[in-house]
Image (spheres, rainbow, N blue to C red):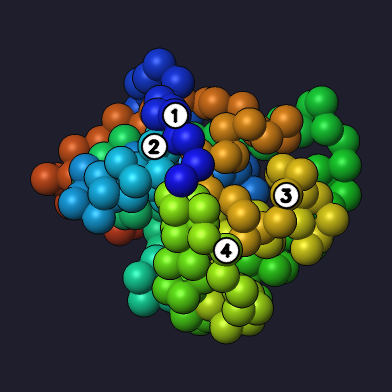
Amino acid sequence: MPELRMSAPPPARIVKYADVRHLMRDGDIFLLRGYYTSSRLFERLTHAAYSHATIAIWWGDRLMLLQAEAHGVEAVPLSVAIGTYEGRCDWYPLCRDTNPEIGTRLPAVLARTKAYIGLPYGYVNFCKKLFKKVLGIHLRETPPEQGMFCSQFVAEAFKSAKLPLLDREAIDTWPTDFVQSPLLSYGGTIAHDPKMLPRRLSDYIPPGRG
């Protein structure tokens, strides 16, 4: 069995969603560390700092979060996804100033994230990669068109657009791995209370107010 070392997220710098929402841009990544039983089990088995990865995207006048969840790849209002999440939600904006290729490649990344909506969750590949991570057992993977797990979805969207976040295959990427990406930086931990249901219009910008 390969040796695994416990990793930890960066020291939390708490920010209010309302204060930083206007700074969030297409392609920013959110890494989540859940308090759910399944999240805790995943973090314990893989010794990972995070258990979920998502992509932010402006969709017309709404700020949305695209993610591969249990029922497949979906798009939900970012404030709702973050506000109802039971766990830590860390914002990792793209480092556009030091990586000019981001501006050129990002439209292709966003096109791919939208094209993947509706794909099933990659349970088979997730289990196979977990076996490899924990037990060192390698099993043949299925193609992404048959389903992707959360971090595979994020990595595949960037890599297939020739803007890889990491120098590895998308299917070999776990949520915690994105912390090592030279294209990302830690922007803060979003303060939220999952017991308080956020307003579903909080991500809406009226015409002329953007």
Amino acid type at image mark 1:
Arg
Q: Which disc is residue 168 wearing?
A: 3
Residue under circle 2? 47
**Disc 3 element:** loop
Residue 25 seen: yes
Residue at mark 4 to residue at mark 2: CA–CA distance: 19 Å
Judged from the image, the secondary structure of the residue bearing numbered disc 1 is loop
Closest to the observer: 158 or 202?
A: 158
Instruction: Sort mark 4 into few (<14), some (14-19) or many (20+) by Cα contacts within 10 Å.
Output: few
Amino acid type, residue under disc 3 in the picture: Arg
SS at mark 4?
loop
Quarter holding residue 192: top left
Q: Amino acid at mark 4?
A: His
Upstream in sequence: badge 1 or badge 4: 1
Write down the residue under mark 4. Answer: 138
Amino acid identity at mark 2: His
Residue 21 in the image: x percent, y percent?
47, 37
Q: In the rendered image of this protein, does residue 98 appear above or below residue 203?
A: above
- Neighbor class of circle 2 (other Cα within 10 Å; few <14, some 14-19, many 20+) is some
Marks 2/1 in contact by CB < 8 Å: the verdict is: yes
The answer to whether residue 157 is left or right of residue 81 is: right
What is the residue that sits farthest to the front in this orientation? Answer: 1
Q: Which mark is residue 176?
A: none
Which badge, 3 or 1, is on the more N-terminal residue? 1
Q: Which residue is mark 1?
A: 5
Q: Of the residues under marks 3 and 4, which one precedes in the sequence? A: 4
The quadrant of the picture occupied by the C terminus is: top right
Are the residues at dot 4 and dot 2 in contact (C-beta closer than 8 Å)? no
User: What distance separates the C-alpha of mark 3 from that of mark 4?
Assistant: 16 Å
Q: Earlier in the sequence, mark 3 or mark 2?
A: 2
In front of the other: 53 or 180: 180
- Position of residue 110 relative to residue 8, above or below, is below
